[in-house]
Amino acid sequence: MSERAKMTLKLKIWRQENARSKGRMTDYTLSGVSPDMSFLEMLDLLNEQLISQDKDPVSFDHDCREGICGMCSLVINGQAHGPEALTTTCQLHMRKFKSGDTLFIEPFRAKAFPVLKDLMVDRAAFDEIIAAGGFIDIATGSAPDANAIPVSKINADLAMDAAACIGCGACVASCKNASAMLFVSAKVAHLSHLPQGQVEADKRILSMVAKMDALGFGNCTNEAECQAVCPKGISISNIARLNRQYLRAALLSEESESMDCLEEGSH
Amino acid sequence: MSDRSLDGRVPFGDIRQIWDRHRFSMNLVNPSNRRKYKVIVVGTGLAGGSAAATLAEQGYKVASFCIQDSPRRAHSIAAQGGINATKNYPNDGDSVWRLFYDTVKGGDFRSREANVYRLAQVSNNIIDQCAAQGVPFAREYGGTLSNRSFGGAQVSRTFYARGQTGQQLLLGAYSAMMKEVSKGHITVYTRRELVELVMIHGRARGIITRNIITGELEKYSADAVLLCTGGYGNTYFLSTNAMTSNGSAAWKAYKKGAYFANPCYTQIHPTCIPVHGENQSKLTLMSESLRNDGRVWVPKARNDRRLAIDIAEHERDYFLEEKYPAFGNLVPRDVASRNAKGVVDDQRGVGETGLSVFLDFRDTIKRDGKEAVGQKYGNLFEMYNRITDEDPYSRPMRIYPAVHYTMGGLWVDYNLMTSIPGLFALGECNFSDHGSNRLGASALMQGLADGYFIIPYTLGNYFAAEHPHEDIIDVEHEAFHEAMQSAKDRFSELLNIGGSRSVDTFHKALGQSMWEYVGMARNEAGLKKAIEEIVDLRTQFWKDLKVTGTDVGVNIELEKANRVADFLELGELMARDALERKESCGGHFREESQTEQHEAQRDDTNFSHVAAWEFKGVDAVPERHIEDLIFEHVRLTQRSYK
């Protein structure tokens, strides 16, 4: 077994009983942390210690622990998913810290993401945004042969870049306005880079943005923090693209309200 | 002691026409009547997500349940490699028949022929559907879909979306679900866990769930229940499954009378990142495409802990290339895993723990250059480096097998119905079409086949033929109260043991027994020992477990305790099944049944069957039922990779 030096850390963790109660930062000292542990395994170790002392373990969201499900979160020393670029909390390893370090561990904070307990937050708002139009309306069985819809490699790659979003919400948590624009623009870009997504493009964009606003997410003021913390490297160029498409969709929708003949007139 | 009467209800006829004719002979529900039927779908992975979306499109009222905070997070999302289909776009000789044949052979002749044929038949529809949903599959410059060969297949039939195929297919199914949510056809219940199945008049009519946030138990009724809750690989504690992946939903069904088929069939994947220490919580898989260019080796000498660079060529044992000159490093998953275990057991493992073997790219880098290797495997090298802090460009990777997938599961008939009327199992949750060994890129195919293209027909047939909704019930029925009470009692029992050990200590101990005796190689003495250890551990669990907190609000320890209590029973059944199956087949290797060259030896005379277990009480011996497997279209052969 590893003889590499085990670390001792000072942890300051947000503890909150439930959505209605007031939370507070609580101090812990944790020793025996191996540099090979993941950040969440470090929290597992803390929880084992708390249980042995008959204390309530720290609740946090996690599932796949391979950086793809988007369930893990945490703001670590002020950064969503911690200090390592392009890395989710579950893939952050303790070798990135030093023995004696103090770590501040807090939940993602946003009006639209209420804290449920300790470090767990409610991100159901993201599902609502997708339900507002983040899909292509095609029923099972009605698809043509897959090669009947050619997609240029460039567009397929651009669609994939945007579709890589894991819906973790770090973009919202890091934005001073708690805007969900990176999330929304990634889904819009994914679908609008593909011919399949064109039919509902305008409706999708208007409806998703309206839903985002209604759910209490803030406006985008081009801070680019979202891009900096995104563990999947989703680019803010998607936001610029969304703004252009939104404008077009909004104008067309006004026209269609007055003319009511958009179908024939579209080009 | 075995009852041989179990019938998979496969219709008679030419295998090529069975599904087509069956679709014609099945009863239909009139579109305007569908809204009268309520369907519960538990799980939102590829099987559950695709089933919920499609049934809702057809007009049924769907209630969908998931354990995560969103349906988009189910563990199908972690699948990397791809999804098979018989499109034959590359014009390289693929066909429905070939995919059928490869899958039956790859499963070591322990799957149901007609099911596998149907799977191959609908595989193309899946690709069409997913492409139309906007799944960003890899493309050629001309705009057509790109294919690759995967897992040693001789044709290029695997479709993929970078290294995130599972993620993209799941997001496709999720988006189809959310489309139906927006229309009011699906109600999604997140952060819920099934804790009881409710049976009324011999049929599945509802579920009791625990709300993970409030701790409340909730009742839901329906005309049919679909379990799409994945596999039970986490019985081993360490696996490539997600942390909340568990066997509890299937286990509750088993305890209510659904048969559990072939529980001993587990897939142990050879290319995983090795265990780093005792605080490890899960294992990470790396795509087996690495074996296309990486060379697997260990030192010839025992306990040789020198760095790879200091070990001369003549001191290295390239054990797969030596033993299997024809396939070399590309032997199937079970063979590669067993051989890695062999050299580690011989004390020739590498790394600090000695529990790993080298996967070396030195020669490929020399031949093709660092850049070319980076283009092919860069993202995998990066992932490896992130986790281990070692650079695979300058020193060999270290790999070791890990539990990855369970081929066993709830027994289902041709219509995907379990032995409980009205209870269906889809995807990895059922005992499936993979026999005793699943081929790469086939899990995604099966989950989506079940959900998009099979259950929508067979469930309608059940409704139209059986009219379960005419037996009008609601959640006030006494069966719901009883199930609720039983769940309540269980949670208060778990909370009130008042012992001294945490849930994880029990789960880790169970994992050790399972890995040691019900892992890559099994024998009679070991399996008997496993059963003994597990029964003993279970007794300890119910005496000495410590769960902090209460049943109100979030209680992560209580959640885990409930799942581990089930794993402690399921593990015993896995060992029992392995003990009874005295042959080796696929992922199940019985040391007593091997060829002279130490390869797996099937026993078709005595074991060409599905073993389906019937619950008889927690501490009673379950009954083993048999469904005979008849092979009319493929010839049974001994797998050989020499």
Image (cartoon, coloured by chain):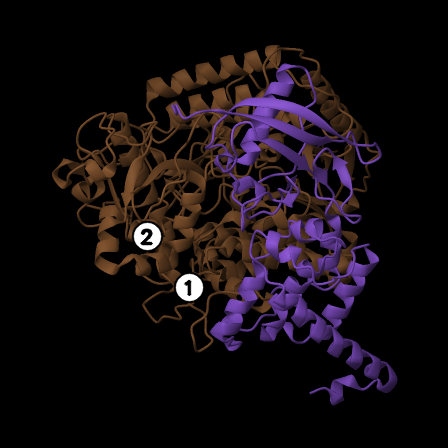
Give the image location of residue B117, x and y in percent. Answer: 43, 56
Q: Are marks 2 and 1 on the same chain?
A: yes
- Residue pointed to by mark 2: B634
In front here: B353 or B473?
A: B353
Residues marked 2 and 1 touching at CB (< 8 Å) = no
Tell me the distance, in whole angstroms, between the alpha carbons under discs 2 and 1: 18 Å
Determine the image quadrant of residue B130: bottom right
Q: Amino acid at mark 1?
A: Thr
Residue at 58% in and 69% down? B132
How many neighbours does mark 1 have within 10 angstroms: few (below 14), some (14-19), or many (20 or more)?
many
Q: Earlier in the sequence, mark 2 or mark 1?
A: 1
Pick the quarter of the image with the N terminus of chain A.
Answer: top left
Q: Is residue B615 above or below residue A95?
A: above
Q: Amino acid at mark 2?
A: Val
Pick the quarter of the image with the C terminus of chain A.
Answer: bottom right
Judged from the image, the secondary structure of the residue bearing numbered disc 2 is loop
Determine the image quadrant of residue B550: top right
Q: Color used for chain B?
A: brown
Determine the image quadrant of residue B59: bottom right
The purple-tinted chain is A
Which numbered disc covers residue B520?
A: none
Instruction: Please state the chain letter of the residue tagged with numbered disc 1 in the rendered image.
Output: B
Which numbered disc covers residue B86?
A: 1
Asked if residue B146 lies left or right of residue B426, the reply is: left
